[in-house]
Amino acid sequence: MFPHRPRSSKLTRRVALLAIGAFLATSGIFISGGSQQSVLDTQNFGQERLISWEQLPQMDGAMCQWVPASATMSLSAALQQSAIPTSEQTAERDPLRVIRDPYPSFSSVAVDMERGEVVAGDENMFQLLVYDRLANTPPEATMTEPRRIIAGDQTGLEFVCGLHLDQTTGDVYVINADTAAQMQVFSRTQQGNVPPSRVLNTGHETRGRGIAVDSENEEIFIASQHNAALVVFRQHAEGNEPPIRLLQGDRTRLANPHGIAFDKQNGLVYITNHGQVSSRPDRGEVDDSDELRPNVPLPRRTAVAGSGRFQAPSINVYRRTASGNTPPLRVIQGPKTQLNWPAGIVIDERRGELYVANDTGNSVLVFPADASGDVAPIRVIQGPKTELDAPGGVFLDSKNNELWVSNYGNHSLNVYDLTADGNTAPLRRIRSGPLESRALMIGNPGAVAYDTKREEILVPN
């Protein structure tokens, strides 16, 4: 990684134009402007590079335009000669092959305890699947067929990552992480390719990863992963209604927040953090509270260059009403905790215990609800018998004393007893794919590279 260095805006623009010009020139495209000169650049690239360009003939019209290979050659002929396909040719071209997981990959889970159903969010195929709570996929079966599926372009579902199920109404609240700045609400009876019953446009600044609903105080809490914030809306907000509260800033110690859990008895909120901070928002001249006024839109803040950092994963504890740049009351963090990409989190208020889906650790960690600092979990569900693989979501079925875990890595929902510990097999298992199939875990790929030595395709997610 190159160290951060100041860049000259003029030189940067020139270098960008040169790179574009060099590429376009090979395809019959030329850029006009500039004068013949060369620069030995030692500032911008970490090593010396000779950059040169020359003035091209002036052309009328736009700065960048097509130049036919000959005065009599048509544009289409020039395109064919330069091996650049036209839009029609591109549209007709089929891929040689497709790398795609044909089975749903579960990111989140919730149980309708009154109606005996379990709802799972599928990041891979953009859908919600509803199963019988007592379903148990036989080893020889490819999968368990869901009772209902909500999927299709009318649903607005995309990168489904978090959900909340209202135990009174059966409504399901869904957020879509990186790809859609929306929260959709579906009623219990909806299925198929249907529009949601309600949509809240959370805004580009609040693309959420985790969601929780405080029905008693009628508030929705969304963990904004990239914006390192906890954003609070009215429970029945819809359309472009702005948030009513914001928790954000260096003092909050929020760092790639994912899961949210409520302690209603003590008025607390627990938030899991992966630990990465992509950049610190430039908050300008604000005081420490920086609380949003009702019906005032969430402000867009620019990032401070060079402020990104890595810190240890954690579980932060705040007052339910915390806002502004407020520090946590307690933080569970350190090597003894075994936290490794902690995602979904749920609290058992009766037993005073926290259950955490430990994604990269392939485990579920259990802590006392009042834990603080670098403390070891009191129980750990982990081992080959558990069949945990990239667990991302957890749900506490207090009616049936069961813990549900969604596995992103092997197409499954696992059910355990609340007291499960160690290398314990699940009580039941719902699979959306064959027993030995492992999920590809391709989620929101940002780029693709090819390793010629190992003949492998590299996909960052």
Image (cartoon, grey):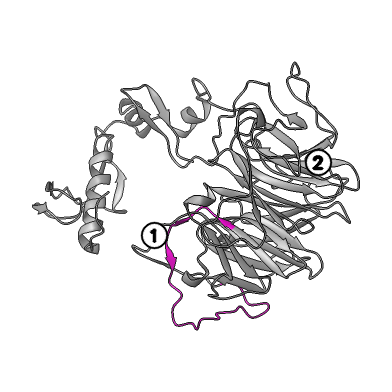
Report the residue marked by disc 1: 308
Q: Which label belongs to residue 118?
A: 2
Residue located at (73% from left, 32% from top): 426
Tell me where residue 63 appears, x and y as whole percent: 28, 53
Tell me where residue 420 appears, x and y as whole percent: 72, 40
- The residue nearer to you, when weighing 422 against 431, is 422
| Residue 266 quadrant | bottom right
Per the image, is 275 magenta? yes
Tell me where residue 180 appears, x and y as whole percent: 61, 52
Residue located at (63% from left, 77% from top): 296
Position of residue 287 relative to residue 181, above or below, is below
Q: Which label belongs to residue 135?
A: none
Residue 53 appearing in the image: no
Residue 119 appearing in the image: yes
Left/right placement of residue 53 relative to residue 367 reads left
Position of residue 197 relative to residue 439, above or below, is below
> What span is colored magenta in the figure?
272-298
Type of the residue with mark 2: Val
Type of the residue with mark 1: Gly
Residue located at (69% from left, 56% from top): 183
- The residue nearer to you, when weighing 303 against 260, is 260
Magenta stretch, overall SS? loop
Q: Are marks 2 and 1 in contact (CB under 8 Å)?
A: no
- The residue nearer to you, when weighing 151 against 188, is 188
| Residue 302 quadrant | bottom left
| Residue 154 quadrant | top right
- The residue nearer to you, when weighing 403 against 95, is 403
For marks 2 and 1 on the same chain, the one whose residue lies earlier in the sequence: 2
Per the image, is 306 magenta? no
